[in-house]
Image (cartoon, rainbow, N blue to C red):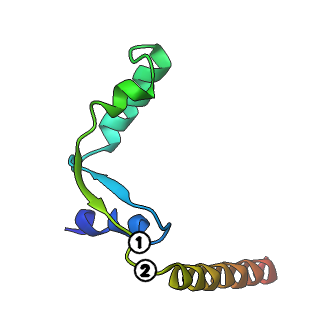
Amino acid sequence: MAGRHVPAIPGRHPGHPVDVSAATQTTSPGSAYVAGLAAGVFPGRGELQRTRRTGRRDEPRMSGGQRQELYARRRQALDRARHRAREEA
């Protein structure tokens, strides 16, 4: 069930749609595609894009202002964590 919701998160934050694969297991095929590209089995990325099936498209759901605010808060939290890590080192 988590797999249905996790891919939707990027679609909400960057401000552009995200196509979610119809396949539930993408790691092994992805590795095989990269290896096939490196070995010359596939002539290019375009060839791979034709094999891809989109299950759904997640559209952005938050405003640009809200996205910027959340990103700023995330950066602040990371800065605090880095500061604490330096103090403890």
**Residue contact at pointers 1 and 2, CB within 8 angstroms:** yes
Horizontal and vertical percent position of residue 89: 79, 76
- Between discs 1 and 2, the one toward the N terminus: 1
- Residue identified by numbered label 2: 62
Horizontal and vertical percent position of residue 17: 39, 60
* In-image side of 84 versus 62 (left or right): right
- The quarter in which the N terminus is drawn is bottom left
Task: Tell me the SS state at disc 2.
Answer: loop
Query: What residue is rendered at 59% in x and 86% in y?
Result: 69
Nearer to us in this view, 2 or 13: 13
Horizontal and vertical percent position of residue 76: 68, 84
Query: What residue is rendered at 48% in x and 68% in y?
Result: 15
58 is higher (above) or lower (below) than 20? below
16 is higher (above) or lower (below) than 47? below
Nearer to us in this view, 24 or 20: 20
Amino acid beneath label 1:
Arg
Nearer to us in this view, 15 or 9: 15
Horizontal and vertical percent position of residue 42: 39, 18
Number of other residues with Cα within 10 Å of mark 1, as a class: few under 14, some 14 to 19, many 20 or more: some
Number of other residues with Cα within 10 Å of mark 2, as a class: few under 14, some 14 to 19, many 20 or more: some
Amino acid beneath label 2:
Met
Quarter where residue 34 is shown: top left
Distance Cα–Cα, label 1 vs label 2: 6 Å
Query: What residue is rendered at 45% in x and 13% in y?
Result: 40
Q: Check residue 12 in the rendering and tell me which mark sits there, or answer none.
A: 1
